[in-house]
């Protein structure tokens, strides 16, 4: 019993000692936290500090002074002629929208391209409708006044043109001859000789020249000449080769290689016009068109005096002013 009492007292003393030690430590803390900060006075109570969250870094924003609503984005262009959805703008940017739709075929990209394509097509259709209205009844603009598309009309023009061509070619026969260069072993030359023979029978003067000094095996053109350097001087690289030559010794090339009758005669007319062996009006008669004398380029050539260009658009002249000038000038010319 005595031992039990003794043990109990020991535990009590130990507990008391621990309690005193704890209170002493708490008192020391209180002195350090309160009494050592006397400058705070009686306002010793403080609320718990709030947790400060780090602020996110924000990018600077441009704020509209009149409204917080962002303005509708606009497309900047170099000039008014490239305003969005204009023909110049579409011509420049439509391929870019097609590339965007093909490289990244999202629904927005594809729809945007098709909208722009439809706008371009509608513009073209609108222009086509107005073009028909512009040319109807205007012989200066209506192509039907030069070359009708009706079958019976075009056939009649072709028949009359053929007669005029034959007339001009008959005039040309009296002024020029044909140099026909060939080689005796050349099958293409022999084939071409048949066409040249027809032209000779029609009255063209033909001078056959053998580049190898030998005649055709079939005996065609027995009265040939031997090439003594003429082919080299004329730059002939292959045969058959044809040239027009005038009585004054002027030479005009027609071609090197096989050609049909119509090709030869057409080239004869072109070369003769270039050499001034026939006039422009005579050459125009050989073309399957009507009213070739009504040539706007010829009528308006050198007639730009009095036209003033818009300085803000370089050499562009306002359409109304240019139309007024052209139509008035054509009326004066008749």
Image (cartoon, rainbow, N blue to C red):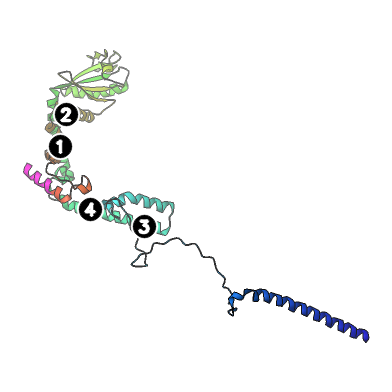
Residue sitting nearer the eye, 322 or 248: 322
Considering the numbered disc 4 on the image, is that residue within a helix, a strand or a loop?
A: helix
Labels 2, 4: front one: 4
Considering the numbered disc 3 on the image, is that residue within a helix, a strand or a loop?
A: helix
Rendering coords of residue 31 (x, y %): 68, 76
Q: How crowded is mark 3: few (under 14 residues within 10 Å), some or many (20 or more)?
A: some
Real-space Cα distance between discs 1 and 2? 22 Å
- Whether residues under marks 2 and 4 lie with C-beta atoms below 8 angstroms apart, the answer is no
- Whether residues under marks 3 and 2 lie with C-beta atoms below 8 angstroms apart, the answer is no
Point out which mark residue 273 bears: 2
Residue sitting nearer the eye, 21 or 221: 21
Tell me the quadrant of the picture where the C terminus can be found.
Answer: top left
Reply above or below: 245 against 10: above
Residue that appears at 28% across and 22% down? 240
Among all residues in the image, which is located at the extreme right? 2
The answer to whether residue 7 is left or right of residue 198 is: right
Point out which mark residue 159 bears: 1
The tag earlier along the polypeptide, 3 or 4, is: 3
Q: Does the magenta stretch include residue 81?
A: no
Tell me, yes or no, if residue 16 can be seen here.
Answer: yes
- Residue under label 3: 112
Real-space Cα distance between discs 4 and 1? 36 Å
The tag earlier along the polypeptide, 1 or 2, is: 1
Tell me the magenta residue range: 324-334
Real-space Cα distance between discs 3 and 4? 23 Å
Real-space Cα distance between discs 3 and 2? 54 Å
Rendering coords of residue 325 (x, y %): 12, 46
Residue sitting nearer the eye, 192 or 135: 135
Tell me the quadrant of the picture where the N terminus can be found.
Answer: bottom right
């Amino acid at each position: 019993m005595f031992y039990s009492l003794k043990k109990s007292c020991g535990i009590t003393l130990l507990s008391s000692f621990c309690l005193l030690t704890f209170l002493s430590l708490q008192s020391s803390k209180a002195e350090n936290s309160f009494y050592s900060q006397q400058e705070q006075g009686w306002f010793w109570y403080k609320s718990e500090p709030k947790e400060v969250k780090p602020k996110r870094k924000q990018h600077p924003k441009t704020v509209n002074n009149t409204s917080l609503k962002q303005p509708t984005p606009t497309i900047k262009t170099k000039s008014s002629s490239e305003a969005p959805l204009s023909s110049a703008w579409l011509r420049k940017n439509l391929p870019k929208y097609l590339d965007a739709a093909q490289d990244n075929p999202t629904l927005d990209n594809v729809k945007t391209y098709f909208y722009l394509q439809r706008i371009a097509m509608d513009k073209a259709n609108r222009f086509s409708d107005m073009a028909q209205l512009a040319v109807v009844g205007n012989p200066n603009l209506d192509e039907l006044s030069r070359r009708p598309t009706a079958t019976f009309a075009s056939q009649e023009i072709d028949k009359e043109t053929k007669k005029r061509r034959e007339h001009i070619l008959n005039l040309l026969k009296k002024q020029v001859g044909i140099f026909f260069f060939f080689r005796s072993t050349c099958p293409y030359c022999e084939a071409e000789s048949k066409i040249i023979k027809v032209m000779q029978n029609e009255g063209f003067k033909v001078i056959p020249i053998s580049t190898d000094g030998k005649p055709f095996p079939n005996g065609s053109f027995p009265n040939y000449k031997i090439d003594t350097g003429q082919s080299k001087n004329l730059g002939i690289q292959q045969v058959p080769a044809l040239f027009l030559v005038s009585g004054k010794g002027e030479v005009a090339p027609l071609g090197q290689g096989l050609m049909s009758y119509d090709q030869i005669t057409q080239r004869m007319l072109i070369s003769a016009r270039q050499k001034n062996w026939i006039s422009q009006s005579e050459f125009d008669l050989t073309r399957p068109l009507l009213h070739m004398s009504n040539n706007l380029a010829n009528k308006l050539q050198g007639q730009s005096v009095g036209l003033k260009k818009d300085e803000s658009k370089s050499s562009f002249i306002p359409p109304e002013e240019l139309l007024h000038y052209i139509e008035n000038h054509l009326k004066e010319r008749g």
